[in-house]
Image (cartoon, grey):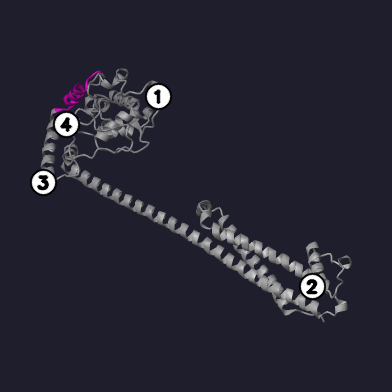
């Protein structure tokens, strides 16, 4: 079922609290085409903008209604819940860059043509219905939402999709696609919005061909494989660099310990050498003093009386005591 | 004509030259390291922090035995100097 300009289902945001942000949290989003300039655009440019936002421009008779529809669509996109939009992108196997705006996510969602809804959460289904202009009120069950989406798809689009799906199935059988498998047909969502580390689901080749056509699907698959290979290699290089840095750090720590141990050993050897030289010097000085003492005539030797001992200013008390002891021992009786 | 003891002359000359040489070499090395690491360059700043981290990661337990021996040798050296002072005092008295 196609939409009409008079009754746009997206114009009832208050009935869809699950995916519509409250008005207080809405923010003025940066848009590529400022609102006041929409009316100045040529009709073909307006049609291109409308297509980008998922609007069927052929349904709008004049320029004013097209501008109004684009404006209404942008208001709707700005009010959509980001985690719900991320659910859709994860389900479609499209990665979400950090910091991406609502409009960029919406444009990406508009390009998703898949009609296999298994694995998509209910809030994601609501977002998909709103952006595909399916008429919903917000109170539908999951099956009703899927029915609305299928009803919204036109006959020729459905035929085209089925044909592509058939080609995709043949291609999958011919080439084999062991890396990916179609998700099980279950009502439970497979994407987990709370898990920040979980990446987008990888699409099967059949899905890709069904969505983008034969050449587009093959090209997308080749591009994804190349990206995956490059990312894998980058991860390997990164881990190799990390291992190398750890190795360098470990070797540096070993070198540091060895260097300090060597320095301390050299210091120890120097101290030992100094002490040996000091000991030799001490013995030499002592021998010299003794020789000098014994070479002196007896009457020239210092007095044995400690009271007459002249102690130089530089001599310590202990030195004086030692000298006195020596004198008393060596003095002739 | 002053009487010169060759052994004492050798000791004092060795002490003076080795002390001055060691002081100069150590000061020069420390100054060059300081100038290099005090640079404002981004990579030098990283290197400076890395050196500090390595210094903090140094485990004293690995070298405590050698450090203890060095301390004891310093004490022995001080005792040697003290004994030298005593001998010198005796020499002055005898002179």
Q: Residue at x 30, y 28 (%)?
A: A84
Chain letter for the residue marked with disc 1 in the picture: A
**Is the C-beta separation of discs 3 and 1 under 8 Å?**
no
**Magenta range:** A139-154
Could you say where residue A159 lies in the image, as x and y percent from the top left? 12, 32
Residue at mark 2 shares a chain with residue at mark 3 = no
Q: Secondary structure at mark 3?
A: helix
Figure check: A244 above or below A55? below
Q: Which residue is mark 1?
A: A25
Q: Which residue is mark 4?
A: A185
The answer to which quarter of the image holds residue A313 is bottom right
Could you say where residue A208 lies in the image, as x and y percent from the top left? 19, 39
Q: Secondary structure at mark 1?
A: helix
In the drawing, what numbered circle is on residue A174? 3
Could you say where residue A97 lies in the image, as x and y percent from the top left? 34, 38
User: Majority secondary structure of the magenta segment?
Assistant: helix
Chain letter for the residue marked with disc 3 in the picture: A
The answer to which quarter of the image holds residue A181 is top left
Distance, label 3 to label 4, CA atoms, is: 23 Å
A66 and A318: which one is in front? A318
Distance, label 3 to label 1, CA atoms, is: 51 Å
Q: Which residue is mark 2?
A: B91
Residue A229 magenta-drawn?
Answer: no
Residue at mark 3 shares a chain with residue at mark 4 = yes
Residue at mark 2 shares a chain with residue at mark 1 = no
Quadrant location, the C terminus of chain A: bottom right
From the image, state whether disc 4 or disc 1 is nearer to you. Answer: 4
A296 and B61: which one is in front? A296
Could you say where residue A65 lies in the image, as x and y percent from the top left? 28, 23
């Amino acid at each position: 079922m196609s939409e009409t300009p008079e009754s746009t289902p997206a114009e009832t945001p208050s009935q869809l609290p699950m995916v519509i942000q409250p008005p207080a949290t809405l923010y003025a989003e940066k848009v590529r085409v400022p609102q006041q300039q929409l009316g100045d655009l040529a009709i073909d440019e307006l049609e291109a903008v409308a297509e980008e936002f998922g609007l069927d421009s052929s349904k709008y008779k004049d320029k004013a209604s097209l501008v109004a529809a684009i404006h209404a669509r942008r208001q709707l996109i700005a009010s959509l819940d980001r985690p719900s939009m991320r659910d859709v992108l994860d389900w479609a196997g499209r990665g979400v860059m950090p910091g991406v705006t609502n409009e960029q996510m919406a444009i990406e969602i508009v390009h998703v043509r898949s009609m296999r809804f298994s694995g998509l959460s209910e809030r994601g289904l609501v977002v998909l219905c709103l952006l595909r202009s399916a008429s919903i009120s917000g109170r539908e069950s999951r099956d009703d939402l899927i029915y609305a989406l299928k009803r919204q798809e036109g006959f020729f689009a459905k035929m085209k999709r089925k044909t592509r799906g058939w080609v995709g199935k043949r291609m999958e059988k011919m080439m084999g696609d062991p890396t990916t498998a179609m998700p099980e047909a279950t009502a439970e969502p497979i994407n987990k919005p709370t898990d920040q580390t979980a990446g987008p689901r990888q699409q099967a080749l059949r899905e890709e061909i069904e969505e983008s056509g034969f050449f587009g699907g093959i090209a997308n698959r080749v591009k994804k494989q190349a990206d995956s290979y490059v990312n894998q290699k980058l991860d390997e290089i990164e881990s190799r660099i990390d291992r190398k840095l750890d190795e360098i750090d470990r070797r540096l720590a070993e070198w540091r310990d060895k260097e300090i141990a060597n320095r301390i050993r050299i210091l120890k050897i120097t101290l030992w050498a100094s002490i040996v030289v000091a000991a030799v010097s001490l013995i030499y000085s002592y021998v010299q003093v003794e020789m000098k003492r014994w070479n002196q005539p007896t009457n020239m030797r210092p007095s044995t009386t400690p009271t007459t001992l002249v102690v130089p200013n530089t001599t310590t008390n202990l030195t004086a005591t030692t000298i006195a002891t020596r004198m008393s021992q060596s003095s002739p009786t | 004509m002053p009487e010169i003891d060759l052994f004492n002359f050798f000791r004092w000359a060795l002490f003076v030259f080795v002390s001055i040489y060691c002081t100069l070499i150590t000061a020069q090395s420390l100054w060059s390291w300081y100038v290099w690491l005090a640079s404002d360059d981004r990579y030098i700043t990283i290197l400076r922090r890395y050196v500090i981290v390595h210094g903090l990661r140094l485990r004293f337990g690995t070298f405590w035995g050698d450090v203890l021996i060095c301390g004891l040798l310093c004490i022995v050296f001080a005792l040697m100097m003290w004994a030298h002072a005593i001998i010198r005092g005796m020499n002055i008295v005898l002179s």
